[in-house]
Amino acid sequence: MNNHFDTSETLDPHDWEQSKALMHKMVEDAFDYVQHVRDRKIWQDMPEEILNTFKTGLPKQPSDAASVYKELQNTVLPYPMGNIHPRFWAWYMGNGTISGIMGDFWASVLNPNLGGGNHAAHKVEEQVVNWIKEIIEFPATASGLLVSGGSMANYVGLTVARNVNAGYDIRSEGLKENNLVYYASTEIHSCNTKAVELLGLGTKSLKKIEVNADYTINIDALKKQIEIDKSKGLRPICVIGTSGTVNTGAVDNLEAIADICQQEQLWFHVDGAIGAIAMLSNTIKPKLKGIERANSVALDLHKWLHMPFEAGCIVIKDSNAHKNTFSLIPEYLAKNTRGLASGENWFSEFGLQLSRRFRALKVWMSLKEHGSERFGRMITKNVNQAYYLGELIKKNEFLELIAPIGMDIVCFRYNPGGLTPEDLNALNKEIKLQLEERAIALPGYTTLNDMYCIRCAISSHRVTNADFDELVYSVLSIGKEIQ
Ligand SMILES: *Cc1c(COP(=O)(O)O)cnc(C)c1O
């Protein structure tokens, strides 16, 4: 033992004033960074010498915070993923909000782990979940919690579905017979497959039903498959409807799925990672009819609600079913009737995580600042822009729309005519990569019916119609140049 240990050493700044000045500078820089995002490249490759800086070993000795910041400015800030840029349309992401940044900042300052039931962070999360319930027209008695994102939200929902409909106490018995079946369309997001695997059921227990021409689940095929499975002695337990598929933004017929689930006594889960929050948009809301009849809905608030990553939400209509799935209270988490450890519903009883960051604060601050109606207008704007881009594509003889526009996702390709399917795919792949490498725009891609297409997921509150004029112009000129 070292008896001369300096007990006054902490992780707080040695010089508070100096540290504060550095933080002030970061705030200045961060605001400039966001305000002028359009002026920088969306994305760029990292040069070798920068890449090498990420290979150095563990720093054992302290260094000056200002020099750490300098390094961040040189090696991290110029090489972002790019998704806060208005012309980022790859995968499916939001852009963040300034109030979201403020919320995350204060969440780290307060730094609660969300355990216990009697402190402000708990109340803020409860209120945010209540607002989400209002948005999707769930009753006030429903339960829910914020999670990392859509994957975790779906996992929680599908777990409750399994436990409720297994027909026995699966928590204590484990899986007795692997005959439980989930249903979803072939367009289902892969995280649901992972969830079913983790639930011990195997991928074979997620039956993927064919889709219609508009990529929504074929309801007749779904009914037939349920009948076939029942006659084979399998136990159908849940149908997953998707409100906004990741490929094309297709919204399943939620009302029809709700009817089937009601008749067959199945759990109705909605993967609303993309579309559930579009209940805020007057133009999309009618398309989502039936979502209010679901037993559980998974949402992603870091997608079309633009929260800084990460923020997802799961809402379960039957709060008892929810709690019975996850609640487990050992003596070190026993509740008190007074003090910090009082309160009925701790979030650890509704999900897998015990320690959880204060995710709700950024949502709470953003919704209070902007109001839900403005968020709804941002969603409507993107849907209108998807149709605007769709029109530009339809009007041009060298461009082809590859899927109907479901909400805010546009799949198209350049087709000058006379090329084989393979050459067309290769050409469009090259166009997409050149758009990216020339930092013109960053669309995504997918393959539909063996056709490679450029896929624009338009979930940006910063994008303008002129950005799509520029996209179409660039696709045509790159296409002509390299074909
Ligand atoms: C993005 C997405 C998910 C997964 O959500 P994460 O937040 O990435 O975990 C699930 N389902 C759909 C339809 C999605 O678009």
Image (cartoon, rainbow, N blue to C red):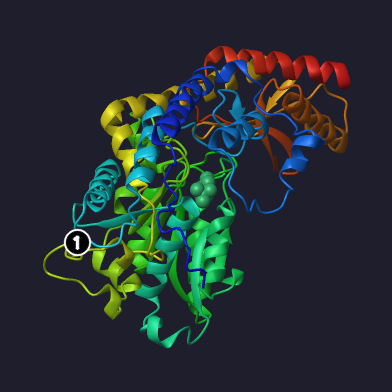
* Of residues 141 and 250, the one drawn nearer to the viewer in this rendering: 141
Q: Could one spot residue 470 in this view of the protein?
A: yes
Q: Quadrant of the C terminus?
A: top right
At horizontal 53% and vertical 22% (from top left) the residue drawn is 33
Residue highlighted by disc 1: 340
At horizontal 84% and vertical 16% (from top left) the residue drawn is 480
Callout 1 secondary element: loop
Q: Is residue 380 left or right of residue 114?
A: right
Residue 7 x %, y %: 41, 59
Q: Quadrant of residue 47?
A: top right
Query: From what the image shows, is residue 450 above or below residue 208?
Result: above
At horizontal 28% and vertical 49% (from top left) the residue drawn is 125
* Of residues 154 and 85, the one drawn nearer to the viewer in this rendering: 85
Q: Is residue 80 left or right of residue 93?
A: right
Residue 226 x %, y %: 48, 68
Q: How many marks?
A: 1
Would you call the spot at circle 1 few (<14 residues within 10 Å), some (14-19), or many (20 or more)?
few
Q: Could one spot residue 290 in this view of the protein?
A: no
Q: Looking at this rendering, what residue extends furthest in the left direction?
A: 338
At horizontal 59% and vertical 73% (from top left) the residue drawn is 202
Residue 257 x %, y %: 40, 55
Q: Quadrant of residue 376?
A: top left
Q: Looking at this rendering, what residue extends furthest in the front direction?
A: 4
Residue 159 x %, y %: 42, 68
Query: Which amino acid lies under the numbered mark 1 shown in the image of this protein?
Result: Leu
Query: From what the image shows, is residue 133 above or below residue 89?
Result: below
